[in-house]
Image: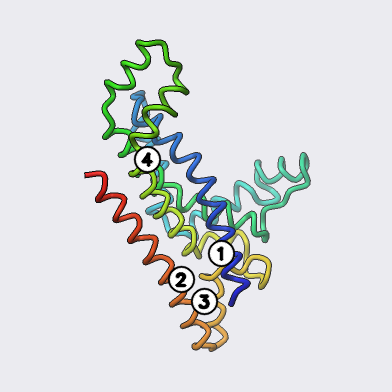
């Protein structure tokens, strides 16, 4: 039971870091910019939240598989193959969880007083200084809540992870996949223990996210 747990924690942490960097940057940019196609791009960034995980997994196979454009480039240039690896599980979890941090970050940045950023620019602050010294600190609680939800979602990811990383014990078998394997094998006691474990962790993360959201108001 410990092997899937440690792998799940590693995958969830790295997926949260990857989704966090992308989601926070995109959330800030989308909150501050308006352009043709803004609504379409916003919908596309939220798409993994409403699509079946298996569909997201299929898109990723098309993109990073051996015959996919990104997959061919990674293999020919760096010898990297993402299919049936724990790194592939990180990618799948990050893509599925990205909408949560993006949506939270965008809402948090939109709630900040834009006049403070404008004043800083007037005083000569560069854009990166405005982001790190004003926008990000003001939006930090909302972003923290989004990161907690992102981590919880990454821990529970199943469909896209199974399609990309497979179910290799000790290599790509995360907790959610281990629950599936235990049920398939008829090992109900193991399935119950794993289910209770992941449920307890997710409850703690949801409580943290709720406290951070309440603290914003």
Upstream in sequence: badge 1 or badge 2? 1
The residue carrying pointer 4 sits among few (fewer than 14), some (14 to 19) or many (20 or more) residues within 10 Å by Cα, namely some
Give how far apart the Cα atoms at labels 4 and 1 are: 26 Å
- The residue drawn where x is 41% and y is 65% is 202
Q: Is residue 107 left or right of residue 3?
A: left
The disc at residue 140 is 4
Label 2 crowding class (10 Å Cα cut-off): few <14, some 14-19, many 20+? some
The quadrant of the picture occupied by the N terminus is bottom right
Neighbour class for label 3 at 10 Å: few (<14), some, many (≥20)? many
The image shows residue 161 at horizontal and vertical percentages of 55, 61
CB under 8 Å between callouts 1 and 2?
yes
Marks 3 and 4, the one that precedes in the sequence: 4
In the picture, the disc for residue 198 is 2
| Image position, residue 152 (x, y; %) | 43, 60
Q: Secondary structure at mark 1?
A: helix
The dot on residue 59 is none
Label 2 close to label 4 by CB (< 8 Å): no
Position of residue 117 relative to residue 106, above or below, is above
Tell me the quadrant of the picture where the C terminus can be found.
Answer: top left
Residue 16 on image: x %, y %: 50, 50
Q: Secondary structure at mark 3?
A: helix
Q: Quadrant of residue 102?
A: top left
Contact between marks 2 and 3 (CB within 8 A): the answer is yes
Residue 133: give x, y in percent of width and height.
41, 27
Q: Report, in whole angstroms, how far the alpha carbon at label 1 lies from the one at label 2.
A: 10 Å
For mark 1, what is the residue? 8
| Residue 216 as seen in the image, left or right of residue 3 | left
- For marks 4 and 1, the one nearer the N-term is 1
Q: Which residue is mark 3?
A: 179
Query: Regarding mark 4 in the picture, which secondary structure is present there?
Result: helix
């Amino acid at each position: 039971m410990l092997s899937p747990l440690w792998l799940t924690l590693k995958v969830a942490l790295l997926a949260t870091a990857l989704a966090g960097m992308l989601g926070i940057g995109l959330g800030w940019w989308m909150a501050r910019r308006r352009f043709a196609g803004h609504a379409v791009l916003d919908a596309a960034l939220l798409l993994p939240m409403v699509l079946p995980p298996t569909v997201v997994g299929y898109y990723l196979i098309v993109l990073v598989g051996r015959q996919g454009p990104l997959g061919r480039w990674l293999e020919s240039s760096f010898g990297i193959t993402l299919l049936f690896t724990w790194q592939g599980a990180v990618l799948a979890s990050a893509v599925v969880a990205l909408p949560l941090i993006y949506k939270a970050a965008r809402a948090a940045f939109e709630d900040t007083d834009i006049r403070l950023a404008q004043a800083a620019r007037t005083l000569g602050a560069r854009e990166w200084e405005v982001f790190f010294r004003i926008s990000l600190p003001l939006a930090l609680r909302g972003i923290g809540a989004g990161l907690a939800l992102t981590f919880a979602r990454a821990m529970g990811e199943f469909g896209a992870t199974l399609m990309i990383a497979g179910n290799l014990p000790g290599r790509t078998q995360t907790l959610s996949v281990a629950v599936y394997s235990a049920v398939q094998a008829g090992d109900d006691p193991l399935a119950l223990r794993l289910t209770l474990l992941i449920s307890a962790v997710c409850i703690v993360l949801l409580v943290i996210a709720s406290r951070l959201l309440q603290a914003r108001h």
